[in-house]
Image (tube, rainbow, N blue to C red):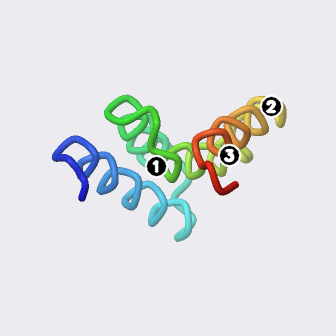
């Protein structure tokens, strides 16, 4: 079961993912993604969404680092 903070992070992450998947990569998706990570820095799905956003907005190495961070949070990855 998710804690209240994890549930809020999951909501923000889903909203960021929705915006990303519907071509709304702008600051709204980034803002939601960053807020999710601030709430729950060990929430792998938020890190993964953020990494995908970074592919379009940052140097590739920054996105790769975020993908690695997400993978490091998943014991089954």
* In contact (CB < 8 Å): disc 3 and disc 2: no
Q: Mark 1 to mark 2: distance in Å?
A: 18 Å
* In contact (CB < 8 Å): disc 1 and disc 2: no
- Identify which residue, 43 or 51, lies in the foreground: 43
- Identify which residue, 40 or 29, lies in the foreground: 40
Residue 59 numbered mark, or none? 2
How many other residues sit within 10 Å of disc 3, few (<14), some (14-19) or many (≥20)?
A: some
Residue 20 numbered mark, or none? none
Name the outermost residue toward the front: 75
Closer to viewer: mark 3 or mark 2: 3
Q: Quick one: label 3 or label 2, which is nearer the N terminus?
A: 2
Residue annotated with mark 1: 29
- Identify which residue, 67 or 75, lies in the foreground: 75
How many other residues sit within 10 Å of disc 2, few (<14), some (14-19) or many (≥20)?
A: few
Work out whether 44 lies above or below 38. below
What residue is at 40 percent from the left and 53 percent from the top?
13
Name the element at disc 3: helix
How many other residues sit within 10 Å of disc 1, few (<14), some (14-19) or many (≥20)?
A: many
Name the element at disc 2: loop
Residue annotated with mark 3: 71
Q: Mark 3 to mark 2: distance in Å?
A: 19 Å
Q: Please state if 48 lies on the left or on the right of 11 as rendered.
A: right
């Amino acid at each position: 079961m998710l804690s209240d903070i994890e549930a809020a992070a999951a909501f923000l992450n889903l909203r960021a993912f929705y915006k990303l998947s519907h071509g709304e990569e702008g600051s709204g998706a980034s803002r939601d993604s960053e807020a999710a990570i601030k709430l729950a820095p060990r929430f792998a799905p938020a890190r993964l969404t953020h990494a995908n956003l970074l592919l379009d907005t940052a140097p590739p190495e920054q996105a790769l680092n975020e993908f690695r961070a997400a993978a490091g949070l998943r014991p089954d990855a």
